[in-house]
Image (cartoon, helix red, strand yellow):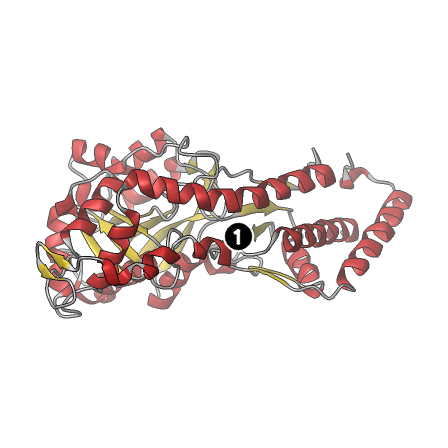
Amino acid sequence: MVNYSKLTKEQRAQLFEEASSAYEALKSKGVSVDMTRGRPSKEQLQIAMPMLQNAGSYNYVTDGGDARNYGEPAGITAARELFAKLMEVERSEVIVFDGSSLDIMYNLIQFAMQFGVRGGTPWNKLDRVKFLCPAPGYDRHFSICENFGIEMITVPMLEDGPDMDMVESLVGSDDSIKGMWCVPKYSNPTGIVFSDEVVTRMAKLKPAAKDFRVFWDNAYIVHGLYGDDDKLKNIFEVAKSVGSEDMIYELVSTSKITFAGSGVAALATSEANVADLLKRIFFKQINPNKVNQVMHVAFLKDVENIKKIMSQHADILRPKFELFERKMSAAFGDCEEVKWSKPRGGYFISVNVNGAAKRIVSLAGEAGVKFTAAGSTYPYKRDALDSNIRIAPSVPSMEEMEFAIDVLISSIKIALLES
C-alpha cells in the first residue's frame, strides 16, 4: 500500500496525475450526491407507511380519555410504557413529546437558562455557563450551545467513549460546567459504543455544580446493522445505585424508526425531574400530539417488534456501510495517513486525514458530492488537526454511494499528494 509521506518526488507526480485524471473523469459525469445529513432514505421511510394506512382503524380512546382531545400532558400511558421498556426505566420516569429529541434538548436548555434547574439560579443570570463536548461529536449539540452563548469545552473521544479522566477532573472542579453532551451508542460521527466502564464513571460523576446534567442522547438505541449484539450499559441502573438519577436526561425518538419529520420523542429522567418539567411544560402546551402517539404505539407494538422493524432498516443501510469499507480498504488499506471508523450501527462513518479535511470536502463538493462542512464535528467548528470528515451513507442509492466513495477516494489522494 502507498505510504504518501515516503514517496519520492517522481512517485508523487505520477500518482497525482493518476488521481487528478480519475477525479476529472468523475467530475465530468455531472452526478450530484448529498451526504450532508443522516436522514432515512425513501426506502426506509416506506417501512412505516402501514402506520398511516391503518390510521382510521386505531382505537383512540385511552385510559386517560380520548386521545383526540385535551389531557395527558406527559403523553398517553401506552406510549410512556413502550418507551420505558425501550430505555429500561419506569413509566413514571418518562415523558413522551412530539417530534424529535433535538426539540426536547433545546427546551431543557431554554428552561435551565430562563428558570434554572429545580429551583437553582437561572443559567442566564450566571457569569459563565459551560458544557463539555466530546469531539468529534454531533454538530447540532454544539449549535444549541452557540445559540444560548454557552461556552464549550472540547473533550477528546477515545476508543471506548469520552476521556473520562478529563471529564471527572473538569466536572468535579468547576461549578460553571452545567452539562455534557453524549451520544453513547453508535456515536455521531465515530460509531463508538461507550464501554461499561465509561457508562459507570459517567453515572458516578461528582459535579461541583448541583444543577449539572448529562444529556444522554441515545439516538441510535436500536439502530444496529448486525442485530442487537452491541449492548450499552443502562446508565440509570448505575445512577440509581448511587443516587445520581437526577443528573441524567436520556433522550430517544422515532425519527429514524418511523418518519423523521413526524415521529415521537421521549425523555427519561428521575421522577423528581419529571414532576418539575411537567410544571414548566404546563405553560407551553396542554398536551403533545396524542393521536400520533396512538398511531405509533399501534404500529410499533413492543420492543421486540421495534427490533424487527429496525432489522428492515439495517438490511437497507448495511450494504452501503460495507461498500464504503470495501472500497476504502482497497484504496488505502494500511495507509497510515488515512483512517476511518468501522461502525456496527448508527448513521455515520468518520474519516480522518490530518491537515486535509477542508481541502478534501472542497474537492468532493466541486465534483458533485456534498459532505458536512469540515470542522462541523467540533465545537465552534475548530478541528485543530483539520482532520475529520463525517460521512452519511443513508440517503444515496448504492450506485450514488459508489460514485460518492470514488470521488472521496480521488479527493483524498489529491489532497495528500498536494501536501
Residue 216 x/y as whole percent: 31, 46
Q: Judge whether residue 28 can be spotted in this image.
A: yes
- Report the residue at 88% width, 43% height from top: 11
Q: Is residue 327 above or below residue 61?
A: above
What is the x, y in percent for residue 62?
12, 56
Where is residue 82, by image quadrant? top left
Q: Residue under circle 1?
A: 394
Task: Let me know if residue 184 appears in the view.
Answer: no
Q: Position of residue 394 (x, y in %)?
A: 53, 52
Where 202 falls versus 291 (above or below)? Answer: above
Q: Secondary structure at mark 1?
A: loop
Q: Residue 383's x, y, as percent?
A: 54, 53
Taking depth in this image into account, of 286 and 399 the one nearest to the observer is 399
Q: Residue furthest front?
A: 57
The kind of residue on which mark 1 rests is: Ser
| Residue located 71% across and 63% down the image | 367
